[in-house]
Amino acid sequence: MPEFLQHLLNALILGGTYALLGIGLTLIFGIMRVVNFTHGELYTFGAYMVFFFVMVLGVNFFASILLAMALGVALGALIEFVLLRPLRGADIDTTMLVMIGAWIAMQNLEQFTWTGIAKSIDHPFPLDPLVIGEVSVSWVRVFVFAFAVLLIAVTYLLIHWTRLGKAMRATFQDRETAALMGVNVKGIHTLTFAFGSCLAAAAGALLGPVFVVAPTIGDLAALKAFAIVILGGLGSIPGATLGGFVLGLAEELGAGYVSSGYRDAMGFLLIILVLVFKPTGLFAAKERIG
Amino acid sequence: MSNLKRVALFVAGIALAAAAPIAGSAETIKIGVTQPLTGAVAASGNYVAQGAKIAESFLNASGGLLGKKVQLIIEDNKSNPKEAVATAEKLIVRDKVPALMGAWSSTYTLAVMPKLMEYGVPMVVETSSSGKITTSGNPWIFRISPTSAMEAQSFGTKVGQFNIKKANFLVVNNDWGLGASNQFQKMLKSKGIAVGVVETMDAKATDMSAQLAKIKAAGGDTVFVTTGVEQITLVLKQMKEQRVTQRVITTGGSSSPDQLIAQAGAAAEGSFHLLFFAPWFPGSAPNPEVATAFVNEWNKRGHNFAGLTEGFRGHDGIMTIAAAIKAAGKAEPKAIQKALWGVKVDGVNGDIAFIKQGPKGKESAQNIPNVYVVTIKSGKVALP
Amino acid sequence: MRHAVTAAWVVFLFSIPLWMTDLYILHILISAGIFTIAAISLNLLLGYTGQLSLGHVAFFGIGAYTSALVSLGFDLELTDSYTFVFAPWPVWIAFIAGIAAAGLFGWLIGKIAFKVRGAYFVIVTISFAEVVRLISLNWVDLTEGPMALNNIPPFGVAIPGLWEQTFYQKLPNYYLILVVAIVCYIVVRRLVRSRAGRAMIGLRENEALASSVGVDVTRYLVLATVISAAMAGAAGGLYTHYIRIVDPDIFLFIYTVTMVIMVVTGGKGTTAGPVVGGLLFGILPEVLREFASPEVQWVIYGVFMIAVVFFLPQGIVPAVTSWWKARFAAPEGGLGTPEGAR
């Protein structure tokens, strides 16, 4: 029983960052109809920026995470501006090819800059875990979870309670009508991509110190984000949130009770199952965002 | 008609490829090195390459070999067996090196071995520990690193002082990890020590919580860990997080205790490490002047001190090949192979000389190196 | 005229080993040839049916692993008392088995994946490749996992009891791959000009219209996937018996991307496109190797791919063809005209 409780707790903590990754991706897809292959690279970028600030420049740990997120916004906006804006109206496959090209270039630039050797990041949390009865969890993971939940909450508030969110929802529903009603669709696209990128960079910045940072960590992160988004239905934020937690649970229980080697396969097996039985994903019944 | 264009493009490609410099000038003696410079075990591979380069400059500073300069050609096998084969093919066919050193992991070395047979080129194996390498009947293999069996046996003479009742294993799921786990299990069982669970992990895995949960549930007082230093760091941290209090003993000599202290901090405290060079005490090495000179040069170049426990392998490997080339009087594969059997090299680890292993008539060569145990005590490396 | 040029080109390819004695360059050409075959197979899906399949490397890898395992033999400990032993088979039969296995998976994936389109389809195909990779990594009993399958026998020809020739050398492998590539090229060319091919192109251009005039969409998509997968499996088989080692990294996404770059750069939906792209991106890395480290090379490819999509969206072959036509007003469409676009 304690082992099962431990798995549940681990799944919850893991699910938080997964949800963060998934929301960023689903937001970009929902509003822009772009399958963002650079999502994993923004994750990697966030992790390397924290490494750079904390380990090279010696900046405060928490400030470094915020800085990494800010740079994620900037990089996301840049990608949107340079690569996606000229391609607006192009078919989904064309943008996908461009994003794949960008992904390859970014990953190898990271490898070139930081070499292929994995880096680890120091964090200020005590090494001894937080013990709750039979189960335990490290303080750094508690922090990661809390921060992820905070960011998810901020995303919800932004989309439901601000004018910007209203414009985003309008663009999601009907781009042309939104434009006619005076929504600056171009601006919304840039902001959406920058915001989604920020969430990806945040996920990387949070998980970098828990594990290690290497140029290819983004690949698995991106694949998992894809899995989460498919689980939840493309474009659905509640779907992505729940999808993140479902994936965390499936991985943790799969690793614990089936085989640790297949931990990373769980998400893809789930996708294939979902698509066989409910091709639109678990929650995409309503074509709306938020 | 656009076919013409296609032909033109194609010819241009060929011409470009052909125009690229092929083979080298005759003024240098080339030695090929294949190491994992990127990927899962990149840190170790880079340290070995740095050690090899030190040997290269030592050799050239003392006049080179046979009146020629020594030139290392170092290729990245990307922590992958297929790439290891590709690098060996490139080094042998394109660069025409008469001897190789590599390929770090047993899996990469085993992958390269058929190529050595095919082209008839000797390779000095500097790190790999799987027993299979020297027992499969490949006469082009000259291993200076210890086998897992030798390591286990050597540790077996000291195992009494650890007072182990029941041990678990957490190893990387390749020839290195599985080989080490088999040999150490055998040794422990022969001493009447119980073996609990044997868990494996992929070389690229970063979350070992599931394996550690099983090890914790199995009980026991010791866990043997065999993998690269990056993963050992994660294992130590995650053990602390999951409150697994078993004593850690790492095998395979790739633990870089200084790196563990730097990156795992207090989580590394009290762990034990089997090493093949103890750079903290170079004066007490079997060849103190060689070891000291190597450590000094390493520090002078500003390399990471933590890398010395791996870097020395590159030095010893290149020095072994150099000694054979000198003895052979020419840089030809067959002659080097013959000469390697007779070399006596003062290495950083100790005296290097080869004995025969494997099926009769096509034996591989194996050196008998020294094995050390160190521990981490109050943030410093100490002898236990 | 056109046939004469085609013939000259084939003769040139056949003559290369006669005057090219550098084994390393032959090695590069063989590797480029294997990837060209894979690119030809991907083009059938990507270029003619318009489906962006990003799991294509799975079929390549399944072909490679199946062919390797059948030729090496294996045993599986199914229960404590029963071990299933599979004795080694001749390489040629293994090669056929690899093609069949890849084709079978093509059929299976076609059935599942074509329930969805667009982004869903892309992600399903990626997921499929990733699951296969993880299985090859973890089912150590069968695949040796990260330890790789070693010492895979090469192709060979023999007259039993009399004469035997095993393809250890580069030369026979070069000709073998050239012949398979030509066969694949002809198969795709024939197919796209048949009734089925026109149906596929109709799907690409307008799926709703095609299905409204009675084209059985799923049937033709699945057909294209099976043929494409089988061809990729053949490329995998050639790879495995030439390189003679296969490990789970064969399923890495980057190889799919390599194939996609080859097809898109050469010109998707043209028969010659993947050949040009395949040779270009098969040879280019080795040329660049002298000047740039691998990561810089990949940065260049990434940027190149973006540039092609932006400035040469049809690919090299159609661009060259139309330039040629505009200039010399050639009366007939060359091989390079996109099928269905003329």
Image (spheres, coloured by chain):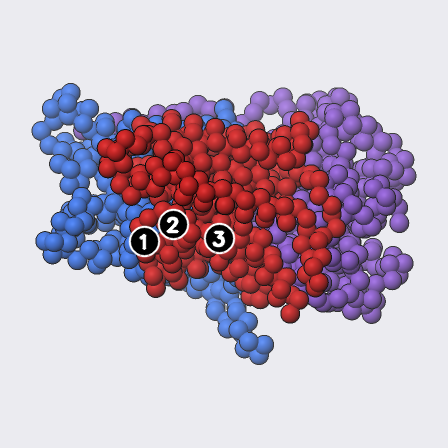
Q: Upstream in the sequence, badge 3 or badge 1?
A: 3
Amino acid at the residue labelled 2 = Ser
Taking depth in this image into account, of B202 and B79 the one nearest to the observer is B202
Left or right? Give the position of B248 relative to A269. right
Q: To which residue does mark 2 refer?
A: A236
Residue ID at (11%, 32%): C332
Left or right? Give the position of B284 relative to A31. right
Where residue C39 sits, quadrant-wise, is: top left
- Chain letter of disc 3 in the image: A
Q: Upstream in the sequence, badge 2 or badge 1?
A: 2
Q: Is residue C164 among the parts visible in the rendering?
A: no
Q: Nearer the viewer, mark 3 or mark 2?
A: 2
Point out which mark residue A286 bears: 1
Q: Nearer the viewer, mark 3 or mark 1?
A: 1
Amino acid at the residue labelled 3 = Gly
Q: To which residue does mark 3 refer?
A: A244
Left or right? Give the position of C25 relative to A203. left
Residue at far bottom of view: C81
From the image, state the color of chain C: blue
> Alpha-carbon neighbours of circle 1 within 10 Å: few (<14), some, or many (≥20)?
few
Looking at the image, is C38 positioned above or below residue A65? Answer: below
SS under mark 1: loop
Task: Check whether the beta carbons of the residues at disc 3 and disc 2 lie within 8 A of each other.
Answer: no
Taking depth in this image into account, of C337 and B66 the one nearest to the observer is C337
> Alpha-carbon neighbours of circle 3 within 10 Å: few (<14), some, or many (≥20)?
many
Colour red maps to chain: A
